[in-house]
Each structure stands twice: as C-alpha cells, then as structure tokens.
Image: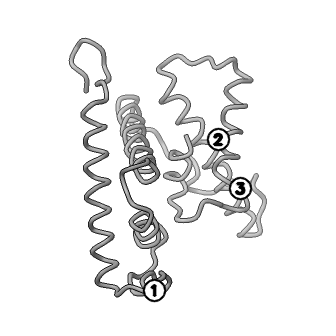
Amino acid sequence: MRASVLRTWRANSDVIAGVDPWDVVDEAWASMAEQGFATKADFLPHALTVARNKAIDHQRRAEARRRDRSIDVPAAQEVPASVGADVDYFRSREHVDAVTRLAAWEEAIHAPGVLTDLQRRVFVAVRIDGKSRAAVGRELDPPLTGQRVGQITAEAFIRLQRHVKENEDSRPQRGGAAGGR
C-alpha cells in the first residue's frame, strides 16, 4: 500500500505536505476497518485503491493550501470523466500491477544478500534520490570516481533486476485455473 501511495505522489521524497506515506497507509486501513473490510471484488485492488485515494486527498489538500484557496472550491480537472467500466477496470489492474512491481523492487533493494551495503547506498543515492554520480563518489569513504559509481550502480541494477525476475517467475499467476492474466 505504501508503494501505491508513493506511485500516486510520484515523489522522490517520502513526505508530502508533512504527511508520511505510512500515515496514509494507516489512514487507509482505518477507513477499511470502519467498513468492516467489506469489498465486492478482490481485496488487494480494493486496498490499493483506498490507499491511492487517500494519497490523492492529501496531495489535493497540499495543493489547495499552496494555492491559498479553499479545498471546497472545485477545480476544473479534479474529477476526470469515466470512459467506461471496462477501461476503468483495466486501468485499475494496470495500477495494481505497477504497484506490485514497485513493491517488488523496493523489497529487492532491502533484501539481504541481493546487494552489498555499498551497492545499496550508491544505487539509492543515484537512482532514487537523483544525486549525480560524481557527488555520490565524493561523499563515500574512500572517495570514488563518478565512473566507478556508475559501474556500481549498473551492477546493482543488474542484481536487482535478476532478483525481481526470479521472484516474479516463482510467484503464482492470478486469475485461477483459466490461465492467469
């Protein structure tokens, strides 16, 4: 659910308007608990949708405060029109798949034995935090060249990609006996 919040925010930082993604996840769980965890469809897409909607609410409130206007004033593009239930369904499935992939990558970054400590620090600094390779190299002890930092980042990416692919292949397919996706 945290990955769903971060994907919705499309943020490099973990905080939007002073709200941590875990707080949004807690809020989503509380909201679902109030409804007795009732859902008409699969629970995972429902839970991710609730978390995404809570993240959108926080984002819109932050934008409203930033623009110095009331949150009750409707914006022109706040509620997009639906083009059809089938399109909405497949968008929802695509969102679930994207969040699942994002969560798999996040788990792989922190999984023991996938990356060395140096690879993890360099990969996170370069690919997630968006720092330059030269800046990351200067911050390390002992310092490394930007070229070497690039090599470490590439090695880490290959190891992460391999780990995610192996775990994706071992995961059961959705969709029951009819053949998955």
Which residue is pictured at 42% across the width and 71% down the height? 122
The mark found on residue 170 in the picture is: none
Q: Nearer the viewer, residue 93 or 75?
A: 93
In the rendered structure, are the residues bearing label 2 and label 3 in contact, judged by CB atoms less than 8 Å apart? no
Q: CA distance from mark 1 to mark 3?
A: 29 Å
Image height of 163 relative to 142, above or below: above
- Tell me the quadrant of the picture where the N terminus can be found: top right
Task: Name the kind of residue labelled 1 in the image.
Answer: Ala
Report x, y in % for residue 126. Answer: 41, 73
In the rendered structure, are the residues bearing label 2 and label 1 in contact, judged by CB atoms less than 8 Å apart? no
Task: Left or right? Give the position of 34 relative to 13.
Answer: right
- Tell me the quadrant of the picture where the C terminus can be found: top left
Quarter of the view holding residue 2? top right
Q: How is the image coloured?
A: one colour
Q: CA distance from mark 2 to mark 3?
A: 11 Å
Which residue is pictured at 68% across the width and 52% down the height? 58
Q: CA distance from mark 2 to mark 1?
A: 34 Å
Task: Specify few, some or many for label 2: CA neighbours under 10 Å numbering under 14, 14-19, or 20 or more.
Answer: many
To which residue does mark 1 refer? 135
Q: Residue furthest left?
A: 179
Which residue is pictured at 37% across the width and 44% down the height? 101
Q: Mark 2 or mark 1, which has the lower sequence index? A: 2
Task: Name the kind of residue labelled 2 in the image.
Answer: Val
To which residue does mark 3 refer? 19
Please name which of the two marks, 1 or 3, marks the residue nearer to the observer.
1
To which residue does mark 2 refer? 25
The tally of labels here is 3
Q: Secondary structure at mark 2?
A: helix
Report x, y in % for residue 11. Answer: 53, 62
Please name which of the two marks, 2 or 1, marks the residue nearer to the observer.
1
Task: Specify few, some or many for label 1: CA neighbours under 10 Å numbering under 14, 14-19, or 20 or more.
Answer: some
